[in-house]
Image (cartoon, rainbow, N blue to C red):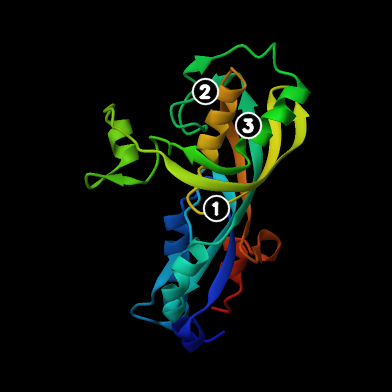
Amino acid sequence: MTAEDYLSGQVLLIDKPLNWTSFQVVNKLRWKIRKSFNLKKIKVGHAGTLDPLATGLLVICTGKKTKEINIYQGQIKEYTGTFTLGSTTPSYDLETDIDKHFPTEHITKDLIQETTKQFIGDIEQFPPVFSAIKKDGKRLYEFAREGKEVEIKSRTVSISEFEITNINGLNIDFRVVCSKGTYIRSLANDFGKTLNSGAHLSALRRTKIGDFHVENAVSIEDFINSFSN
């Protein structure tokens, strides 16, 4: 691929590794493209953030294709992952430590399967307080880290598919197909509440965005190594 290819616009599918932010991935790719072709600047952006503790599909746009980011952001997404029952965290995932424990003796496999039906269709969801959503000019996670309480409004999201793929003790593997703006961390928290217990997200992988599939994505390392210099 040439410098002109990247400037005129490319859609790159990257399999984001664990513990990388989406911003770090964009920066790494931008740096490599600029360095390889001696470019002063090039636009590079992603079409939908993945949390550092999530892996999977990042759609990266370069050059003129960055104008299409909003199109890709609005497309249906698919995730797989694991809920862990019986405990919660302030961030709804493993970014923060477990703060509460709940009984799980009453939870059966049938109850878990039945509970998924309550989350199919349009649902009201509160975003996690540890999220990048802005309120009064600040990110919600900034308020959370300062220990400040802030009122968060619910939003309507749509879940078209929600299936339990495996149950291993308190670890529940799932697959979800959902609309833009759905927080799987919030789904984990709400799922635990609906079971009259608690739950947090212990693993998450994005597998699809629209017609793009993670099976067609490359690692950051493979992308970097694809350049001859």
Left or right of residue 120, residue 127 in this image: left
Q: CA distance from mark 1 to mark 2?
A: 24 Å
Q: Amino acid at mark 1?
A: Ser
Residue at point 63% right, 31% down?
83
Residue type at mark 2 is Thr
> Does residue 95 appear left or right of residue 87 in this picture?
left
Which label's residue is closer to the chain start, 3 or 1? 3
Within 10 Å of disc 3 (Cα), the crowding (few <14, some 14-19, many 20+) is many
In which quarter of the view is residue 144 placed? top left
Label 3 vs label 1, nearer the camera: 1
* Residue at x-position 28% and y-position 32%: 150
Q: Are marks 1 and 2 in contact (CB under 8 Å)?
A: no
The residue most toward the left is 136
Residue at image mark 2: 88
Mark 2–mark 3 Cα distance, whole angstroms, equals 10 Å
The residue carrying mark 1 is 179
Residue type of the residue flagged with mark 3: Phe
What residue would you read off at disc 3?
83
